[in-house]
Structures are given as C-alpha cells and as structure tokens.
Image (cartoon, rainbow, N blue to C red):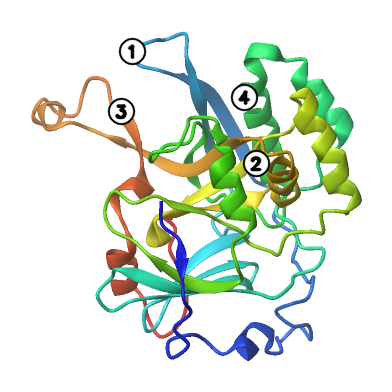
Amino acid sequence: MVDYHGLARRYLIALGLLMRPQLNGGTLGGRHLRAQSKAMQLTWHDAFDRIDPAVWKGLRVRADGLRAPGFAVSACYPGYVRLAVRDLPLVWTRIDEDYWGYELLRAPAVDGLSILPPITAELAREHREANSAVWAAWARTYARMLRDSPGTPLYDGDWHIGALSRQLRPFELAASIVRRVVNQKATGYVQWDFGDTVYPITLRDMSSPDAGRVKAWRKHVGDGSLPPVLLQWVSGLAAYVVLDGHDRLLAASLEQAPAPALALEPVEEVVSSEERKAGGHGSRREVARSSQTRARPVARRATRACAPVVHD
C-alpha cells in the first residue's frame, strides 16, 4: 500500500488554476454541466469466471453513440494528468520525470457536482432483496445511471462493471483501506513501484460525520444494505478513483467496517498468438485496456493542450 508523502511545492500547480474563469461565464468550481446526448445506447451481458462458471465476475457493457465522455482523464503538457467533469477539473497530478510518483492536488470544493444521481434508501433496500444476485443488480443500475448522467465516463466501446482487481478483494474495500481513503488530504505526493497498490483517490472532500446522508448510510452499514462504492481504474495514476460513494465510504469508516465496491474500466478483446496464426478464429479473452499501460506512456502522450486519454 502506498501513502501520500510530504508535499513538494516546487512542482505543484498554482491553486488559482483550478478557479480561472471559463468562457461560459462560470468558474472551474461551478456547477455548469452541459447535458449529454440522449443517443447513447447500452447493451450488456453477464460475465462469469472461466474456471467456475457459477461465479459472477461482472457486467460486460457495450456503449454506442457517445464519443466525448463527461468525466475525462486528460494528459497535459508537461507531464500532467487531469481528471475533470466537462472541463471542471477535480484533480491535477504531475508525474515525476523519473516516473516513480506524482504530485496530487484536488479541487478545494465542487459543490453539487456528482457523476451519478443520488441513491435513495428505497433503492438500497430493493437491491438487498436480490440476495446472491446483488452485485449484478447494482452493476445494471450503475450502467443505467452512467448512460443518463451528464458526467458519465463512458465513451464508445466495451466496458466492465464488476469485481475489483490489483491486490484488492473482489467486491469490497477492507476496513483498513476505507479508513485511509477517507483520511487522505487534498494535496500530497504518491510514490509507487510496480506491484504497489495505491489506495483509491477521492474526487471531493468528505462530508461532515454529522451530515444527514452519512448518518443514514451508517444504518445501512449495520443491516448490510450499503450500496457499493463505484470506482474507476486510471492507469496513468496506477489507482482507482472514487466516482460515487464518498458519503458511503465515510459511513463505513465510522462503523469500522469494509465498504462494498464495484469497479468500472474499459476492456478489449485480445487474440492469442496461436489464434492470430490461425486467422484470428477461436475464443478470445477480454482484458482491461488500462492494465496494459501506466504513467510513463500517458506522460509521453502529453501535449501542450490537454488531450483526453480514452484508454484510461
């Protein structure tokens, strides 16, 4: 597990850049989100474990009709990675020249900004009744929400919503990880190496422990109906980011409990060398595109203008 280290201010972007005026008259801390196209279409099917077909691994989702995601990962000159919702920056990072870590700066506050609509207690209770199929039920619900959200990270292609990977439990964040996630600061330094696990990065400040939604979610932690946190893998940062569920993470932390979680990431079919020699026929396996890359190629692709990195 990798922790934030002391802040190296010589590399950090000025905080004012996060609040510079925009052409639409708002600021980067405002709520101005353009509506997404309603032409987006999703199709999906369940994916099961190859060894044990009875074990559900996730939902394979095909997105068509939308090329510009609302939530975008962008590479910016000279070696910055920006996470933004419709040009509203949430997180800036600067990759070290030797690629062994990055400075991180999160926007001080983006009030009212969410990638998914609020999840109600009634919806949580309905999904609890799904029993063994609860993960598949939530994956379908999140797919529909992402389809309709103006801040969706989806773009045309194939996606996976399901089990976490990379040295984490398949469908939950351990209590020790949850505690470190909710206590992370808005500024810091992340040091990594191959094989390290960087804990999930939050996109906003945590709410007050006395907030109404946090208190309500604490009750759901107790009865086992807490909706899963939705994470997205960003290969350029070698970390998941929290797309939805900040209050649920805090509720789980206050109860000293693990938090259920689902991961979102793009996937593609990979044909083995034997299949290529045979003309590409036969079974193919789907792997996460993001698992093939890391900060080095992302930094090298950076240009003087921020360019979306669609494979992250």
> Looking at the image, which is closer to me, 192 or 262?
192
Give the Cα distance between marks 4 and 3: 22 Å
Visible residue check, residue 64: no
Q: Earlier in the sequence, mark 4 or mark 2?
A: 4
Which percent across, then down, holds residue 30? 78, 76
Kind of residue at disc 3:
Arg
Give the residue number, with chain letter if any, for mark 2. 229
Q: Earlier in the sequence, mark 3 or mark 1?
A: 1
Q: Earlier in the sequence, mark 4 or mark 3?
A: 4
Which percent across, then down, holds residue 164? 48, 36
Give the Cα distance between marks 3 and 2: 27 Å
> Is the Cβ of the residue at disc 4 closer than 8 Å to that at disc 3?
no
The residue under the point 60% across, 46% down is: 178
Kind of residue at disc 4:
Trp
Give the Cα distance between marks 4 and 2: 11 Å
User: Does residue 221 appear to the left or right of 184 in the view shown?
Assistant: right
**Residue 51, disc:** 1
The residue under the point 67% across, 44% down is: 147
Q: Earlier in the sequence, mark 4 or mark 1?
A: 1
Give the residue number, with chain letter if any, for mark 3. 285
Which quadrant would the C terminus be assigned to in this image?
Answer: bottom left
